[in-house]
Amino acid sequence: MAVLQQELTLGEAADQLARALPGHRVEILQGRLTVTPPPDGSHALSLTKLGRAFDRAGLVEAGYEYVQGVGLWLPTLPEDFAIPDFSVVDPDFRDAHVTKNYYAPNVFRMVVEVTSSNWSDDLGPKVECYAQAGLPVYLIADRKHDEVLLYQDPTDGKYPDPTRYKRGQTVPVPESVGVTLDLSVDTLLDGDG
């Protein structure tokens, strides 16, 4: 019996993996397929509390929205995309639809990643991809190294060195995001507080 084999594009392989692994996050970063398992409770709680903080700061009243797990089209390579944990976006972000469930980077004001088992992707390829996409603010709650990193204002496709925050400190959300807000490092790392 002959078996027909079809070579899949990277995008097709990502689609198949996403269907086969419900709850997992499938992304293509710099031409590399990555799969992250569902978040743990502390990770999820950090994002919930982050949303509440932006609500209290009046993000919607300031004319913006926040979303979780929305696809971000990356201009680095033709099939590249990421799915940030949390994003602050323009209110009309849906008008910037590129393909599938991915939106153009120009409508993202800030992206946040809370590290999981794929922490090296958040600290490496995503820093490069997000800078090349021109994302003004990238915040990483780096649970592996117990700190929060704030990247902002990329120039020529690169972020300057990040500002690092330790436990007990607060992270000031840059004015470019649209609200005045200080975020607790401990809450970002643990979901507590």
Image: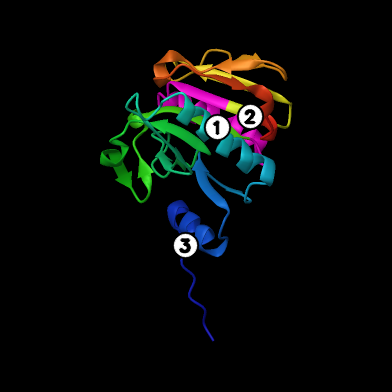
* Callout 3 touching callout 2 (CB < 8 Å): no
Compared with 20, 61 (above or below) is: above
Can residue 142 be seen here? The reply is: no
Label 2, secondary structure: give it.
helix
Q: Residue furthest front?
A: 56
Q: Which residues are magenta?
A: 115-139
Tag 3: Cα neighbours inside 10 Å, few (<14), some, or many (≥20)?
A: few
The residue under label 3 is which amino acid type? Glu
In magenta stretch: residue 130: yes
In magenta stretch: residue 141: no
Report which residue position mark 3 lands on. Answer: 7
- Could you say where residue 139 lies in the image, as x and y percent from the top left? 55, 25
Report which residue position mark 2 lands on. Answer: 188
Which mark identifies residue 50? 1
- Counting labels gives 3
Name the residue nearer the viewer: 121 or 23: 23
Q: Quadrant of the C terminus?
A: top right
Name the residue nearer the viewer: 59 or 4: 59
* Callout 1 touching callout 2 (CB < 8 Å): yes
Can residue 58 be seen here? The reply is: yes
Q: Does label 1 or label 3 sit earlier along the sequence?
A: 3
The image quadrant that residue 58 belongs to is top left
The residue under label 2 is which amino acid type? Leu
Label 3, secondary structure: give it.
loop
